[in-house]
Amino acid sequence: MAFDGFPAEAFVFYQRLEADNSREFWQAHRSDYERYVLAPVRSLAAELEPEFGSVTVYRPQRDTRFSADKSPYKTYQGAFAQRVPGLGFYLQISAAGMQASGGFHSHSSDQVARYREAVDADRSGAMLADVMATLAGEGFVIGGDRLKTMPRGVPADHPRADLMRHRSLTASRDWPTESVTGTRDAFCLIEQTWRQLVPLCDWLGEHVGPGAY
């Protein structure tokens, strides 16, 4: 089935789930989730796959085993196009609207070591700095886990000091519900955004790669 946009009911569903994140609510409204959220996300993912590769649509249940928050369900629907484990392109919808991002979230010690080594090197570090400057100039929000201070042994006046503090690195864009409700423009926004993120994901794939777990 072709992707025709996210219906207003998808965002209403998440507004209601935020107010009542219970198994009782979920069971009573499972069909709303499957019709208004899951089906459109799967259709969107299928249209993105020819260019970006297999897209995994995440399950709605939260893993609460190690969390103090025992709410059983995620208040968003995410999907991920993986380049290497833990690195690639991401999209989600929630009560707030739609988001598209790219980069790497996992940060095993070997990944962080490779990342910092590449940022420290003149050629690869300057390349990443250029990529991130371009993305910031295009309106992307730069994110990721960062240290409050410089890593041990890195001088405070390092030419790429801000990048050196990162333990993971992402760039993202957000759109409010009114921008993506009931229109195929949502596909175009995700497609264009992921294309802009290809240089970041390529750099991370070459210099960081998967973690050794």
Image (cartoon, grey):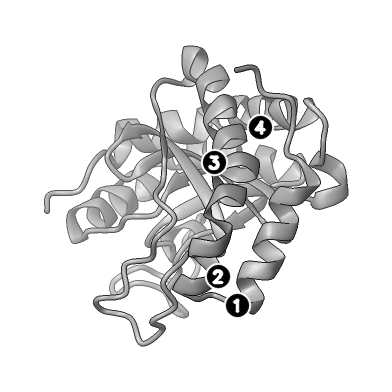
Q: Amino acid at mark 4?
A: Ile
Q: Amino acid at mark 1?
A: Asp
- Labelled pair 2, 1 in contact (Cβ < 8 Å): yes
Q: Name the disc covering residue 25, or none.
A: 2
Residue 24, how many percent across, how many down? 49, 73
- Mark 2 or mark 1: name the one nearer the start of the chain: 1
Sequence-first disc among 3 and 2: 2
Query: Where residue 122 is drawn, which disc sits there?
Result: none
Q: Secondary structure under badge 2?
A: helix
> Up-down: is 8 above or below 55?
below
C-alpha gap between disc 4 and disc 3: 17 Å
State if disc 3 and disc 4 touch (CB < 8 Å): no
Mark 1 residue crowding within 10 angstroms, few (<14) / some (14–19) / many (20+)? few
- According to the image, label 1 marks what residue? 20
Q: Disc 4 marks which residue?
A: 190
Residue pictured at 40% horizontal, 57% vertical: 168
| Side of 39 where 209 appears, left or right | left
Say if residue 97 shows up in the picture: no
Is residue 119 visible from the viewing direction of this image?
Answer: yes
